[in-house]
Image (cartoon, grey):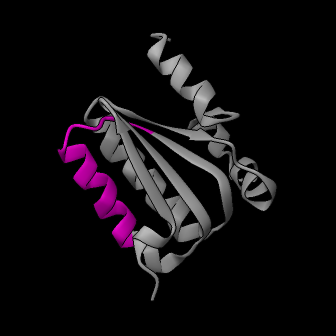
Amino acid sequence: MRHIGEVLKFRREGRIGVVRLIGEVDTALREPLIVFFDDKLADGVDIFVIDLSETTYISSAIWGALITVLKHTRERGGDIIICGPKGQVRKVYEVMAFDKVFKTYNDVYEALADLKGGS
């Protein structure tokens, strides 16, 4: 079984957490992913910028987990921003209309510039 650290890299910039998901993110990582985000929320991170530019696959259970995390985050006044979905990940993202649920940017730099600019 894979560990969440194999597919997730995290850095913090104040109250913003930048999460990079790498490779295939499958169903087995659903609960650890939710726990990870909830722990970061408890530590004061209230905006997550999720970089999907290196993600090749996301299971439906993980998409569901991200919706759960979005709910937890918004309950605390925060938000989740998605950056750089490509290929099959982008197709699923658009077909499932997640682009209507999450604010989306081309890359992390664009998202951070917008967030730090006060927009």
Horizontal side, residue 4 vs residue 95: left or right? left
Q: Percent from the top left, x then y, of residue 45?
A: 28, 38
Q: Percent from the top left, x then y, of residue 92?
A: 73, 57
Part of the protein shown in magenta: 31-48
Q: Is residue 40 magenta?
A: yes
Q: Is residue 95 magenta?
A: no
Q: What is the total number of numbered labels drawn onto the structure image?
A: 0
Q: Is residue 58 above or below residue 87?
A: below
Query: Of residues 79 and 5, which is closer to you in this image?
Result: 5
Horizontal side, residue 106 vs residue 19: left or right? right
Q: Percent from the top left, x then y, of residue 112?
A: 52, 26
Q: Residue at x 60, y 29 (%)?
A: 109
Q: Percent from the top left, x then y, of residue 70?
A: 41, 45
Q: Residue at x 49, y 10 (%)?
A: 117
Which corner quadrant of the image does residue 98 belong to?
top right
Q: Is residue 44 above or below residue 36?
A: above
Dominant SS in magenta: helix
Q: Residue furthest bottom?
A: 1
Which corner quadrant of the image does residue 11 belong to?
top left
Q: Residue at x 35, y 71 (%)?
A: 31
Horizontal side, residue 15 vs residue 47: left or right? left
Q: Residue at x 25, y 44 (%)?
A: 41
Q: Quadrant of the N terminus?
A: bottom left
Horizontal side, residue 53 vs residue 101: left or right? right
Which corner quadrant of the image does residue 82 belong to?
top right
